[in-house]
Structures are given as structure tokens and as C-alpha cells.
Amino acid sequence: MNGPVRIGVLGCSAIARRRTLPVMRDADHIEVAAVASRSADKAREYAAGFGGEPCGYHELLARPDVDAVYIGLPNALHHEWARLALLAGKHVLCEKPLATDQSSAKDLEDLATTNRLVLRENFAFLNHPQHDEVKRLVADGRLGAVRTVAAAFGFPPLPATDIRYRAELGGGALLDAGVYPIRLAWHLLGDGLSVAGAVLRVDPALGVDVSGHALLTSPDGVFADLEFGFQHTYRSRYQIWGSAAALRLDHAFTPPPGHRGSLDIEEQDHGEQLVMPAAHQFRLSVERFADAVRTGWSARTEAPWLAGARETARLAEEIRAVAVTVPAQAGAA
Ligand SMILES: NC(=O)c1ccc[n+]([C@@H]2O[C@H](COP(=O)([O-])OP(=O)(O)OC[C@H]3O[C@@H](n4cnc5c(N)ncnc54)[C@H](OP(=O)(O)O)[C@@H]3O)[C@@H](O)[C@H]2O)c1
């Protein structure tokens, strides 16, 4: 592909307005071609701010001037609309999580692979170089043998009308915040993770989980201890505890673009602090997706994205299946 990637945006979401559309509008190799909403006024408003033709969802997928689609819809709608977009021959950048269950993720993976279309899940943190540095330290043996990865992502309650409190839209803390530590565990420990146990705190009135805790094990016996929720003070952190040293990274999942994270290494008799580079991970995620579209589909580059999305969906589904549920106190949401 020679010109810019022409992207159609499905849904005038908060995340599209705050993060995705500003990055797309300013990127060299991306053109916002169309913006779809259920409301004509909203589509016009977003198009006026970010470019593109306002339209409806089905109309957007039928447009020949749209090469790729960005999906920022509620979680339960990702599978349906990603499927329709792929069937229309569009590449897809979908908000996390790609799917709410394993079979839907596998369905999309098969469709994208058969049609040689780029399909990525927008876990922006995976693009931040600070995690490459962590992987390098682990691979170099700096921590010795890794025993436990502990990760947490949580934040305070959201407005009562938020999609995250609506079960029928794929709401809940597991699918919203929990998928970050799950994806991190797969990123660091690889395939074959199994769920040893889990607890979910469920709001009885809403029927959605508002926080949770899961314990996974890797095939070679490493534990992944994962916490998530929206009943907390802000936390976005992971720690890797090994036989020789432990490492801790704060602001792990959603660091602001200018933030230079500190990687704290603690050994038996001393500590060390490494300052990480800053990065605009959201921009990197969107631009790398567009680069993949421009370069042309490649099994080698797309396979890890597809496997990561499938494994994240599988583990979230298994956590839900085994979890002991406890009621959230009234007003917890
Ligand atoms: N990668 C990240 O860092 C990040 C951060 C936040 C959120 N997200 C993900 O982005 C997605 C959207 O989250 P958000 O917070 O931006 O949500 P939001 O503001 O509520 O946006 C969702 C949009 O979906 C459309 N929609 C279509 N059918 C709907 C329905 N039945 N009910 C409600 N909305 C419907 C609406 O657009 P129209 O009214 O225009 O049709 C709505 O604006 C979620 O999957 C979330 O996990 C990702």
C-alpha cells in the first residue's frame, strides 16, 4: 500500500475521543476516512473534530475508501463487529479485550488468518519499551530463576452509567482491568498458563464483578498472582520475584506519554533503580497497526498478537468459570 491507511472508526466512544482519534488525526500514514455512530449528530461532531465522513455502522463497513476499522465499542460487541469488518475485507484494530470468550477469539483469529487481514487487540502497553527492558533483564538471568509474577491493575469506581457496570455489554472488572495483568502474565510467561484459583467480588444488583484476584501457574511452575478491580486507589504495577533478585515496575499499564518509569531491582544486600525511557504507547500501538497494514499481512508478525488475544480470552473465561464469588458491599460500585 502506498498512500495512508484509511481508517473507519466504529462508535464515538470516550477512548476514541481521548486517545485514538487524536493520534490518528496527527499520524503521517493514517487518514480518518469515516466515523460511525448510532447517532448522526455524534458522528458529525466527531468527524468535525477529527476528520472523516460521518455515517452509520453498516454504511462504514460498505465504504470502499475504508481500508481498516477501529472498534471502540463495548466488549460484548467486539466479536460481532470485528467479524463483520473482516468479512467486509477490512483490517481491524479492536479495543481490548478482543473477545469475551475463547471461541469468539479463535473465530476472529481464523477469519483474519484465512483472509490475510491484520487483526490486533489494542493493548497499548505491549508497545512500551519498558517491558522489553524487563524481558531482557529476565532473559539475562538478572533475577535468577523466576518464581512469581505479581501484577495489579485497579482504579476507583466509575460513574454509575458506565458500560463497565452493564453485564449485557460485557462489563465487569475482569474483562476491563483484569485482562491487563492476564495479558502481561502471558507476555512474560508464555503459553500453557493454567488457572489454579480465583475470586471475584460481584455487585449483586448489577450482576457484574467489580474486582477480583486470580492465581495462575505456568508449565514450569511459576506463579502469576493477578489482582484487578474498580474499587481501589489507582494501582498499575507488577513485580517479578526470582531466586536472585526481585524487580518492580510502577505505572506499568497506562503510563502517560512523558512518564519515565523507574524499574526497581532489589537484591539480597542492595537495591538499584533503572530509569526507563518515556514512550507514547497509544501512538505506537496505532502507528504499528497502520505499518502492519501498509507492509502487508505477515504470519510471523501477526501470530503473537493473535495468540495473545486468544490466550487472554481463554484465561479470562477460565477465571470466571472457577472463581469463587463473594458479594460486593452495597455501594461498592
Ligand atoms: N486501550 C485502552 O487503553 C482502553 C481504555 C479505555 C477503554 N478501552 C476499551 O474501549 C472500549 C470502549 O470503552 P469506552 O470507555 O470508550 O466506552 P464508551 O465511551 O461507553 O463508548 C462505547 C461506544 O460504543 C458505542 N455503542 C454501540 N452500541 C452501544 C450500546 N448498546 N451501548 C453503549 N454504547 C454502544 C457508542 O457509540 P455511538 O453512540 O457513537 O454508537 C459508545 O460511545 C471498551 O472495549 C474498553 O475496554 C480501551
Image (spheres, rainbow, N blue to C red):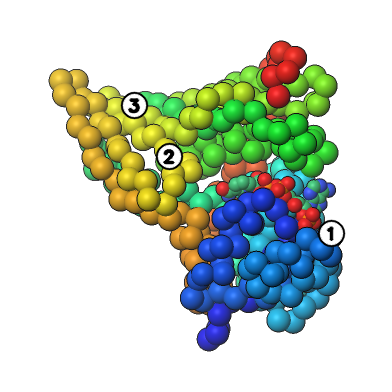
Q: Position of residue 123 (x, y in %)?
A: 54, 50
Label 1 and label 3: CA atoms lie apart by 48 Å
Q: Amino acid at mark 1?
A: Arg
Residue named by callout 2: 252
Q: Quadrant of the N terminus?
A: bottom right
Residue named by callout 1: 38
Instruction: Give the residue displayed 31% in from the left and 31% down from the top.
Output: 247
Label 1 and label 2: CA atoms lie apart by 34 Å
- Direction from residue 212 to residue 57 in the image, left or right: right
The answer to whether mark 1 is within 8 Å of ligand 1 is: yes
- How busy is the neighbourhood of tag 1: few (under 14 within 10 Å), some, or many (20 plus)? few
Instruction: Give the residue displayed 77% in from the left and 65% down from the top.
Output: 43
Mark 1 or 3, closer to the camera: 1
Q: Determine whether 332 is above or below 52 in the image.
A: above
Q: Position of residue 322 (x, y in %)?
A: 68, 23
Q: Position of residue 158 (x, y in %)?
A: 67, 33
| Callout 1–callout 2 Cβ contact below 8 Å | no
| Mark 3: secondary structure | strand
Q: Amino acid at mark 3?
A: Trp
- Direction from residue 286 to residue 108 in the image, left or right: right
Question: Which residue is nearer to you in this view: 318 or 37?
Answer: 37
Instruction: Give the residue displayed 51% in from the left and 76% down from the top.
Output: 29
Sequence-first disc among 3 and 2: 3
Residue named by callout 3: 241
- How busy is the neighbourhood of tag 2: few (under 14 within 10 Å), some, or many (20 plus)? many
Res 246 visible:
yes
Question: Which residue is nearer to you in this view: 305 or 48?
Answer: 48
